[in-house]
Amino acid sequence: MSDPRGWTLAQTALLTIDLQNDFLHPEGAYGRAGQGAAAIAALPTRIAPLVAALRTKGGLYISAQFTLVPGPGGEPLISPHLKVLRPFLTRGDFAPGSFGHQLVDTLQPADFTVEKVAYSAFYQTRLEYILRAMNIRQLIVGGIVTNGGVASTLRDAHLRDIDTVMLTDGCAAFRDEVHDATLLSLGTVTHQMTCAKALGWLEGAA
């Protein structure tokens, strides 16, 4: 893993995972079902200054957003394991173009939006195409959940020899112990920084 202090920030993107209304907004799918966590709700405000700082250095902000593809009649295509975990999901949730599918207001607009249908932002998406087309070689990653979409994306980036920084308090899980265990397990595949430390790095970079 290359030292982030040597990164060319114009070749770096901040990538957030699943920071969208259906997960975070009170009127979104999870909010209506009473599913949420204070640690998750705090993320957009914590990450927004990093987006602004990276853009001043020529970098990009990419939002990867979980998507339930509407099937015939509008019923969403939901994997069996997700049906068991989240039985409250229904027609219209996480549907492309819907309020719930959108990036939260605090982080809008993203430079690029990637629809994803599974945990990793790389799986069956256009993310790699965007990275190549925009000459992005490094990623700063945050979002939800730490042990799901964030971890899967970081591991997939590692397999592709893409260097990453994981924002340790810029991602969250529904249980703190799961978040902490995931940070420990990912220590060999990504650099880790708090949002405050990452902001200082970005603002101080040449």
Image (cartoon, rainbow, N blue to C red):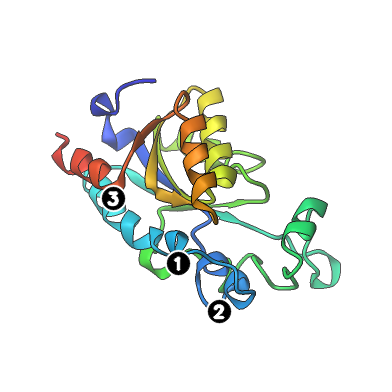
Q: Residue at x 52, y 38 (%)?
A: 182
Q: Is residue 26 above or below residue 188?
A: below
Where residue 52 appears, as percent x and y from the top left, is 26, 54
What's the residue type where badge 3 is placed? Leu
Looking at the image, the residue that sits furthest to the right is 72
What's the residue type where badge 2 is placed? Glu
Q: Residue at x 47, y 32 (%)?
A: 184
Where residue 22 appears, as percent x and y from the top left, is 58, 68
Q: Earlier in the sequence, mark 2 or mark 1?
A: 2
Mark 2 and mark 1 residues within 8 Å of each other at the beta carbon: no
Q: Can you tell which quarter of the image residue 174 is in?
A: bottom right
Mark 1 burial class by Cα count in 10 Å: few <14, some 14-19, many 20+: some
Residue 62 in view (yes/no): no
Q: Which residue is mark 1?
A: 104
Q: Which mark is residue 27?
A: 2
Q: Earlier in the sequence, mark 3 or mark 2?
A: 2
Question: Total number of numbered labels?
Answer: 3
Q: Which mark is residue 50?
A: 3
What's the residue type where badge 1 is placed? Val
Q: CA distance from mark 3 to mark 2?
A: 27 Å
Quarter of the picture holding the N terminus: top left
Residue 74 in view (yes/no): yes
Mark 3 and mark 2 residues within 8 Å of each other at the beta carbon: no
Q: Earlier in the sequence, mark 3 or mark 1?
A: 3
Which-is-in-front pick, marks 2 and 1?
Answer: 2
Q: CA distance from mark 2 to mark 1?
A: 12 Å
Q: Which mark is residue 148?
A: none
Regarding mark 2 in the picture, which secondary structure is present there? loop
Q: Residue at x 55, y 79 (%)?
A: 27
